[in-house]
Image (cartoon, rainbow, N blue to C red):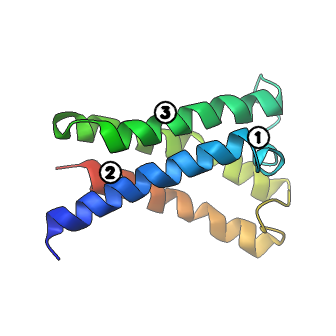
């Protein structure tokens, strides 16, 4: 498979994953996502989850629909989002909050290593 084809599949997969996660924020997984909101966030947990869900849906759609000329820019925004939500993953680990089947310290700790992979995915699937 050509490298451009793999990159395109990865880009669409990232967009679809963000849209799905965003829909989860807004509907079926709201309580689960609230477990990741740190106490220091100055909004209500549910509001934070709703706003971040809207951002994820919009960003996923942008990744899928953005012209090639702007792909890299949108990918950097996605990488920034994944960086920005890392404190939530850390909070879930530190505060021992169960959500998404992450119900042990080892599982919550392993989840921390997914964030760099998401950042890499965002940058590589949209970069030049």
Quadrant location of the N terminus in the rendered image: bottom left
Q: On screen, 51 above or below 10?
A: above
Kindly identify the residue that appears in the image at 72 percent across and 36 percent down: 49
Element type where label 1 sits in the image: loop
Above or below: residue 86 compared with residue 77: below
Give the residue pinned by disc 2. Answer: 123
Q: Where is residue 104 in the image (x, y as percent from the top left)?
A: 83, 72
Direction from residue 39 to residue 110 in the image, left or right: left
Residue in view at x 81 percent, y 59 percent: 99
Per the image, label 2 sits on a secondary structure element best described as: helix
Q: Residue at x 63, y 37 (%)?
A: 53
Q: How many marks?
A: 3
Q: Which of marks 2 and 3 is in front?
A: 3
Query: CA–CA distance between discs 1 and 3?
Result: 20 Å
Q: Could you tell me if residue 27 is visible in this image? A: yes
Q: Position of residue 74 (x, y in %)?
A: 33, 36
Q: Which mark is residue 12?
A: none
Query: Alpha carbon of mark 1 to alpha carbon of mark 2: how far?
Result: 25 Å
Q: Residue at x 84, y 46 (%)?
A: 31
Q: How many neighbours does mark 3 have within 10 angstroms: few (below 14), some (14-19), or many (20 or more)? A: some
Residue 103, horizontal then vertical, whole percent: 84, 69
Q: Mark 3 points at which residue?
A: 58
First-in-chain label (1 vs 2): 1
| First-in-chain label (1 vs 3) | 1
The relative height of residue 44 versus residue 72 in the rendered view (above or below) is above
Disc 2 to disc 3, how far (Cα)? 17 Å
Camera-nearest residue between 52 and 89 = 52
Disc on the earlier residue, 2 or 3? 3
What residue is pinned by disc 1?
37
Outermost residue, top side: 42
């Amino acid at each position: 498979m050509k490298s451009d084809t793999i990159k395109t599949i990865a880009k669409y997969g990232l967009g679809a994953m963000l849209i799905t996660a965003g829909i989860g924020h807004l509907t079926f997984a709201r309580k689960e996502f609230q477990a990741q909101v740190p106490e220091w966030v100055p909004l209500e947990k549910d509001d934070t989850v709703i706003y971040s869900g809207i951002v994820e849906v919009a960003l996923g759609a942008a990744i899928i629909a953005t012209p090639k000329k702007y792909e890299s820019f949108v990918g950097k925004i996605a990488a920034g989002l994944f960086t920005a939500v890392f404190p939530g993953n850390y909070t879930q680990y530190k505060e021992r909050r169960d959500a998404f089947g992450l119900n042990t310290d080892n599982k919550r700790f392993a989840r921390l290593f997914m964030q760099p992979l998401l950042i890499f995915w965002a940058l590589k699937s949209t970069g030049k």
